[in-house]
């Protein structure tokens, strides 16, 4: 028996006890009598049939005609048993002598049955809400894992090409590229398994990531990376900001042979608000037109929507010779260990 089923049985048991006490209470005769138990059992059995047979067979599959017909039959049986059997046994000389009418009988049998059935509706609705919430969370987690898994192949594709080009030319920078690439991969593969990581570690990764990309620029331009004093008690979703840095280097170096200018700034205008700014120069060439629709940018926009709903603002400004990204994030504090 599952935990949910056990909880439901306990809930129904407590509810039946409470309803029995409410409908059986008589201030002039506070004792519990056998006829009260038997009459209430008649209602409880009917409600049980409705809850665990009629609802799943007819109501939830939207067979409403059969549902209504079944309810009418069950209520009629309850009244018939009460009037023709129970009252003849317990009250043969009083209530059992005459039928009080359909309206009076309905007013007597419907309240407890409706309350028990209504509680089942409420329980099922609560369970459906829990299942839907869990399903949404599962879909969100799966999509996040998929989006994060795209980062590594995309990143490797770009930098392995760069490494291959330097190796072919026997460049003395090849060992440095391998070393920087190893440091970046170590972080992405081992330190970012969680949805959120230390802000300090993420910024250190961004510095290493920038150094790795800076090897492509050599003496063709200027690279600036500025960070204000880093708060130690905040965490951030990993590998989001690096996508913008990657795009900046990729499109500056592919469109310019010289005068490359890339400026990265991380500041904290508010206590829990990070502002990331990345500005890169470029020239109007066909190979940068795909920037807004690149795999990395689409990826990061989806991750921001999933991880920071209503807690981020992403502004992208594409001018004639510059591309500017400004991202504001509301950060969360790390849990105390």
Image (cartoon, rainbow, N blue to C red):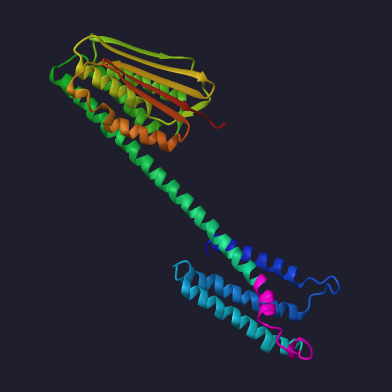
Q: Position of residue 98 (x, y in %)?
A: 73, 89
Using the image as rendered, state which of residue 283 and residue 170 is in the foreground: 283
Residue at point 35%, 32% (across, down): 300
Residue 195 can be seen, yes or no? no
- Residue 110: in magenta span: yes
Q: Quadrant of residue 49?
A: bottom right
Residue at the outermost right position: 28
- Foreground residue among 291 and 179: 291
Which segment is the magenta one? 92-111
Where does the C terminus fall, quadrant-wise?
A: top right
Q: Position of residue 93 (x, y in %)?
A: 79, 91
In the picture provided, is 106 more to the left or to the right than 279? right
**Is 139 displayed left or right of 170 in the figure?**
right
**Closer to us: 149 or 31:** 31
Q: Within the image, what quadrant is residue 237 found in?
A: top left
Q: Residue at x 74, y 81 (%)?
A: 35
Direction from residue 171 to residue 149 in the image, left or right = right
Work out whether residue 223 can be spotted: yes
Give the answer, above or below, for where 239 lies relative to 82. Answer: above
Measuring from the top left, give residue 290's x and y in whole percent.
23, 28
Looking at the picture, how far across and down is residue 193, in whole percent? 40, 36
Q: How many marks?
A: 0
- Eyeballing the image, is 2 above or below 333? below
Q: What residue sits 36% from the left and 33% below the top?
A: 301
Q: Main secondary structure of the magenta part?
A: helix
> Does 122 lie within the magenta span?
no
């Amino acid at each position: 028996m599952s935990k949910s089923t056990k909880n439901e049985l306990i809930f129904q048991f407590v509810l039946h006890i409470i309803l029995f006490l409410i409908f059986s209470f008589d201030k002039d005769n506070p004792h519990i009598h056998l006829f009260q138990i038997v009459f209430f059992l008649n209602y409880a059995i009917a409600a049980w049939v409705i809850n665990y047979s009629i609802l799943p067979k007819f109501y939830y599959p939207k067979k409403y005609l059969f549902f209504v017909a079944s309810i009418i039959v069950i209520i009629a049986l309850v009244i018939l048993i009460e009037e023709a059997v129970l009252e003849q046994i317990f009250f043969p000389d009083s209530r059992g002598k005459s039928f009080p009418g359909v309206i009076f009988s309905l007013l007597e049998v419907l309240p407890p049955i409706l309350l028990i059935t209504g509680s089942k509706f409420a329980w099922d609705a609560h369970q459906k809400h829990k299942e839907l919430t869990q399903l949404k969370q599962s879909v969100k987690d799966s999509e996040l894992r998929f989006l994060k898994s795209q980062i590594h192949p995309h990143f490797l594709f770009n930098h392995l090409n760069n490494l291959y080009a330097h190796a072919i030319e026997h460049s003395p920078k090849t060992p440095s590229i391998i070393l920087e690439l190893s440091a970046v991969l170590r972080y992405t593969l081992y330190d970012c398994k969680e949805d959120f990581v230390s802000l300090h570690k993420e910024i250190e990764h961004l510095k290493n990531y920038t150094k790795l990309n800076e090897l492509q620029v050599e003496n063709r331009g200027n690279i600036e990376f500025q960070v204000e004093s880093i708060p130690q008690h905040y965490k951030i979703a990993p590998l989001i900001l690096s996508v913008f840095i990657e795009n900046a280097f990729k499109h500056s170096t592919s469109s310019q042979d010289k005068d490359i200018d890339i400026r990265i700034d991380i500041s904290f205008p508010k206590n829990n608000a990070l502002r990331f700014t990345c500005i890169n120069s470029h020239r109007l060439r066909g190979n940068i037109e795909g920037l807004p629709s690149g795999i990395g940018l689409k990826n990061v926009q989806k991750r921001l929507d999933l991880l920071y709903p209503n807690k981020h603002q992403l502004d992208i400004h594409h001018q004639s010779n510059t591309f500017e990204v400004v991202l504001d994030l509301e950060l969360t504090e790390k849990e105390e260990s």
